[in-house]
Amino acid sequence: MKLSARNQLKGEVVSIKEGAVNAIVGIRITGGEVITATISMESVKNLGLSVGKEAYAVIKATSVMVGVD
């Protein structure tokens, strides 16, 4: 699979919090950080996601917000 998104972070699924329509999926990447994404329950099933499975967090953004205290 090839994607145009440059930010492709390989990791392991560490959590899936299922809801009625969507799920919040946590992926632990190199360094120990966990990235979360909200995806449809249909996508969870189509991708065969489960805790412990290898997956990629793919980030494609046209804008990024930066904040400071």
Image: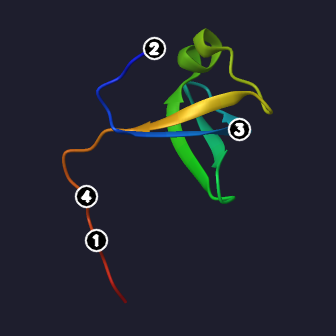
Q: Position of residue 26 (x, y in %)?
A: 64, 44
User: Which comes before the other along the chain, label 2 or label 4?
Assistant: 2
Question: Where residue 13 sits in the image (x, y, percent)?
Answer: 70, 36
Label 3 sits on residue: 12
What's the distance in space between the residues labelled 2 and 1, CA to CA?
31 Å
Instruction: Report which quarter residue 42 is drawn in.
Output: top right
Q: Is residue 15 visible?
A: no
Q: Residues within 10 Å of mark 1 (few under 14, many from 20)?
A: few
Q: Which residue is mark 2?
A: 1
Tell which residue pokes out farthest to the right in this image. 52
Q: Are marks 1 and 4 in contact (CB under 8 Å)?
A: yes
Residue found at x 56% / y 50%: 35
Q: Nearer the viewer, mark 2 or mark 4?
A: 2
Q: Circle 1 is placed at which residue position? A: 66
Q: CA distance from mark 3 to mark 4?
A: 25 Å
Q: Nearer the viewer, mark 3 or mark 1?
A: 3
Q: Nearer the viewer, residue 36 or 60?
A: 60
Residue receiving disc 4: 64
Image coordinates for residue 31, horizontal then vertical, percent: 65, 59
Sequence-wise first label, 3 or 4: 3
